[in-house]
Amino acid sequence: MSNRWTEVMLLGLEPHEHDFQEFKGAGWVVGPDGDVAGDFTFALSKQVSAFVNGAGGRLFLGIDDFGHIDGGVTTKLKGGGTRAWLEDVVPMAVDPPLRRCNVFEVTSDDPASRIRPGHAVYVIDLPASEDAPHQAKDHRYYLRIAGKSRPMGHLHVQDVLRRTRHPRLALSRLGPYGELEPYEGDPRGPQVLLQFRALIANAGRSMAHHVGLELQVPRPLAGSEVRRRMKESEDVLHTQTPGLMTFFRHHPTPLFPGQIVYAGSVWVSVHLNNRAAVRDGAVLGWTVYADDAEPLRGSAPLAQYQIVQRALAWLEEHTPDPSASKRPPPAAKRRQSRRRT
């Protein structure tokens, strides 16, 4: 779906309505008194329900049934502007409300434009919904059939409910687990070990049969003690690429819709040689896998966690002063040294 619409793109549309495209003139939105048409909300909910219950599509406001721009809809239909108002109204036009939709406002300053000054054509992108079926305000379910929004029969509703969809997982939480652990067993200097734990949730309707979590740690933060601790977890696999350590854990059981489970944990080490990288934005990355769904990826800057800030403060307090070794010894020690020689 386009991220930006222009009048040229509107003029290039196929001038026919079909299962993925519906035209509505300005009079469908604005009544004779210049305010919102009395039946607009109900009519809108029918169109929204039909598109999102099917394969999705676009609803154009300000284009007549023949595909011609009719001057457009005023951009100031409501106090905050027509676009902002539509962005609030469209998701709530159906039950359950939509989690995804886009509203684009197409205006023009060209005197020869078919869009009048102070008016716009509104393009409402309505992708297919994983939460379908969505009910319109008249308590019916609609579907696009032969270019029209028609009520769904019982078999249609059952078919939508039984659609095979990919599991939809989300990272429920990624945060510190336990307290920071100062570690002074490394000859290179003091360090602080931190453990992070991740929870994942099945936010969709389909069971996730095979679930896995990858946690990626910048190589400077995964020293020998981190690797030793991670190797103690027999269910964790680790790989190394330039600049990165990756730890993978396969969740042993399927994940039911609505279920939240522990997915994995990882240690990181903050020490004198990597504290600048932590301050400058080093991240803890993650990837969630579920059956054949598209992997879900993300990252979190380590510096955003308070426990990391505490670890940096501890290092500051326990860092030897490098200038101390360069200071001359006290006078008494210098005299004793001369006597021995």
Image (cartoon, rainbow, N blue to C red):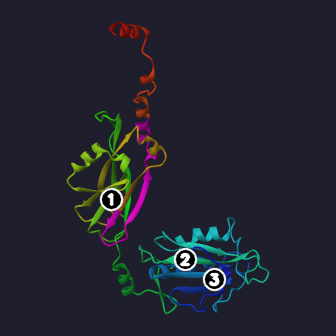
Residue type at numbered disc 1: Glu
Q: Are marks 3 and 1 in contact (CB under 8 Å)?
A: no
Is 27 left, or right, of 337 in this rendering? right
Q: Which residue is mark 1?
A: 214
Helix, strand or loop under label 1: strand
The residue positioned farthest toward the right in the image shown: 111
Q: Could you tell me residue 251's position as x and y percent? A: 25, 60
Helix, strand or loop under label 2: strand
Counting other residues with Cα less than 10 Å from the Cα at mark 3, is it few (<14), some (14-19), or many (20 or more)?
A: few
Q: Could you tell me residue 138's position as x and y percent? A: 51, 79
Counting other residues with Cα less than 10 Å from the Cα at mark 2, is it few (<14), some (14-19), or many (20 or more)?
A: many
Q: Which residues are magenta?
A: 288-312
Q: Reading the chain from its start, which is encountered first: label 2 or label 3? A: 3
- Is any atom of residue 239 visible in this view? yes
- Is any atom of residue 255 visible in this view? no
Residue type at numbered disc 3: Met
Q: Is residue 315 above or below residue 269?
A: above
Q: Is residue 167 above or below residue 311?
A: below
**Is residue 36 covered in magenta?**
no
Q: Could you tell me residue 237's position as x and y percent? A: 25, 57
Q: Which residue is mark 3?
A: 9
Q: Which residue is mark 2?
A: 125
Residue type at numbered disc 2: Asp
Quarter holding the C terminus is: top left
Counting other residues with Cα less than 10 Å from the Cα at mark 1, is it few (<14), some (14-19), or many (20 or more)?
A: many
Residue at mark 1 to residue at mark 2: CA–CA distance: 33 Å
Identify the residue at horizontal 44%, vertical 49% (top origin).
Answer: 282
244 or 28, which is in the foreground?
Answer: 244
Residue at mark 2 to residue at mark 3: CA–CA distance: 15 Å
Q: Reading the chain from its start, which is encountered first: label 3 or label 1? A: 3
Q: Could you tell me residue 106's position as x and y percent? A: 67, 76
Q: Quadrant of residue 152?
A: bottom left
